[in-house]
Image: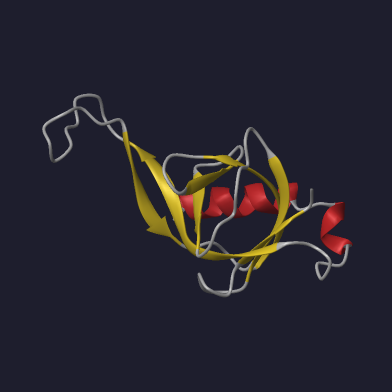
Amino acid sequence: MKHYLIITIFFAIFSGSAIGQSLDDLDSYTVDEFYKKIELDYGTLGEDGRPIDFVFVKTELESGTYEIGLTDGPGDLYEVKGTDIYIEFRGYFGYAGYGTECIMKVEGGYYSSTVYKLE
């Protein structure tokens, strides 16, 4: 619950002026799942017996509209910069590199959440 509050506060702080612009003219991408990165204790082993440092667990975000930066993450995941939140999209999002500015609209459910590219 404490992490949920921290994430909510973070997004509230970084909600910015770009949110007021029209989203109709921007490329939009439907969110498949939200994940939270959980750091593990030293010495934790994966199913193959090799050390692992973290896992990703499904999570939910509070409804709202947020200005975010996305970067490429592992596999099909994209990292919300400055957080431990990762996004998987239903379709192809493309290369985010070290930072793509976006607006994320969370409307109470994975498939009703959308990310809009500002660039």
Colouring mode (rainbow / by chain / secondary structure / one colour): secondary structure
Viewer-nearest residue: 54 or 116: 116
Residue 70 horizontal side relative to residue 42, left or right = right
Residue at 70%, 54% (x, y): give it: 12
Residue at 53%, 63% (x, y): give it: 91
Locate the N terminus by quadrant.
bottom left
Residue at 84%, 66% (x, y): give it: 25
Asked which quadrant contains residue 65, the reply is bottom right
Asked which quadrant contains residue 98, the reply is top right
Residue at 87%, 63% (x, y): give it: 20
Residue 60: horizontal and vertical position, in percent? 48, 63
Q: Is residue 119 above or below residue 52?
A: below
Q: Is residue 27 above or below residue 9?
A: below
Asked which quadrant contains residue 43, the reply is top left
Picture mark count: 0
Residue 110: horizontal and vertical position, in percent? 50, 69
Viewer-nearest residue: 5 or 83: 83
Viewer-nearest residue: 34 or 4: 34
Q: Is residue 96 above or below residue 106?
A: above
Residue 97: horizontal and vertical position, in percent? 62, 35
What residue occupies the far top of the structure in this picture? 42
Residue 82: horizontal and vertical position, in percent? 60, 37
